[in-house]
Image: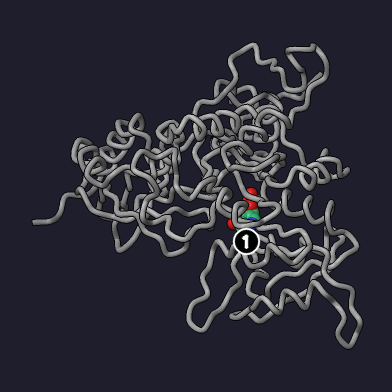
Amino acid sequence: MTAPRGPDRPPSVDALARSLTGTGVPHPLLVDAARAAIAAGDPGSAPARAAAIGRSLLQPVVNATGVLLHTNLGRAPLGDHVLPAPAYSNLELDLDTGGRGSRQDRTAALLARAAGAEAAIVVNNCAAAVVLVLAALAAGHGVAVSRGELIEIGGGFRIPDVLEQSGATLVEVGTTNRTRFDDYRRAVEGGGWAAAPGAALVLKVHPSNYRISGFTEDVAVADLAGLGVPLVVDIGSGLLDAGCPWLADGPPSWLHGEPAARQTLRAGADLVTFSCDKLLGGPQAGVIAGDAELVDRCARHPLARALRPGGLVLGALQETALAHLRRDGGSIPFWRMATLTSGELRVRAEALGVGEVVACASVPGGGTLPGVQIPSCGVAVPGDHAAELRSATPPIVARVADGLTVCDLRTVHPAEDGHLAATLATIRSREPEPRP
Ligand SMILES: *Cc1c(COP(=O)(O)O)cnc(C)c1O
């Protein structure tokens, strides 16, 4: 016998959860929402709690910020590189022999080919690439790094900490603003009053997200190549070739000075490490590329298996690598967006037919190319409507500045223009009429 329920009794968790179905949220999570609502003494909040769970799921969003590599929005935009269903793949099968193949061989080989490297392997991200290189080539030894390159990237990727985790010891070289060849040479030779052993590896790190200017001095990769120990350059952004052969018009002017894999290896680096979801324009992954023997030592280190990516990532990365090799930058979403002219964007902004067409500036983002702005075009509406735009389906993320909500069209896919226009129009129609 269950006790009769009066109107003032809270509903059962189960009944409340069942009243929430139809939202696409699985039943156990609806039970959690119902339980939390009842525990809070507010059963009426259950639908909003269930909706909040639905909204917290990974989903496509419209990036109207003009930040091309937006860390909160997954950095480089992904194309539709999904494997066709049923989605088995020859991930570790050699189709010629029928024997076991290596998941590393094909995608990594394509990237090596595109970067002019002898060999490469793919890991989870660039942080993993740096850890693996140091663990495989320098554990128990000193690694020489310029004091001007002891940087932190993103949340918590700090070169001194990464070095320590890999089992290597940091040998600081030079000063924050000036480091010379002789500083590196002394670090590699060792000795001194403490008779320290020499560093077994030189690591150069591109300070991607900041610039030192003024009274500075740095040593070129080519000058460090003859020191007699492996020279590893963490270039970070994954620009494969400074000449950008995948772009019909060559490198955009805003790319100026960004180190590229091919040129860094040609200058004498033994290995480069880089991210795949920055200027490469692919999914989240990291690459170690260069000398075949050193790459092989990294691949054989026990950490390599712990750091390897799955088939989904390798499939998407393969498409990115093939597009680079086909010289088809237009099929890489990041490069397609990055090279649109503001004239093309203005035509789209005018066609939206809502808000005011404004000139604005996009940025590469993702901790690359600090200070670089790319002239762009978008639409602006008065007021801060960021929260309303985020609550649209799919959510729209825009920029608010100087009392205006600005939607930069560079990072918006043209197929999303209609949704953006319709959402902005509903916001405008709800605005109070200006008083006469
Ligand atoms: C971005 C970056 C990293 C970290 O890359 P993730 O792929 O995010 O791990 C490391 N080094 C440099 C120089 C970078 O620019």
Question: Which residue is pictured at 83% across the width and 38% down the height?
Answer: 305
Q: For the residue carrying disc 1, how many other residues have a C-alpha within 10 Å: few (<14), some (14-19), or many (20+)?
A: some
Q: How is the image coloured?
A: one colour
Up the image or down, 423 lies above or below 142; here it is above
Q: For disc 1, does the CB lie below 8 Å from ligand 1?
A: yes
Q: Position of residue 294 (x, y in %)?
A: 79, 48
Report which quarter residue 98 is drawn in.
Answer: top right
Q: Is residue 178 visible?
A: yes
Question: Which residue is pictured at 29% across the width and 50% down the height?
Answer: 376
Report which quarter residue 116 is drawn in.
Answer: top right
Residue at the extreme left: 436
Question: Which residue is pictured at 55% across the width and 61% down the height?
Answer: 208
Q: Quadrant of ligand 1?
A: bottom right
State the SS at label 1.
strand
Q: Quadrant of the N terminus?
A: top right
- Please name the residue that numbered disc 1 is placed on: 153
Towards the viewer: 181 or 10: 181
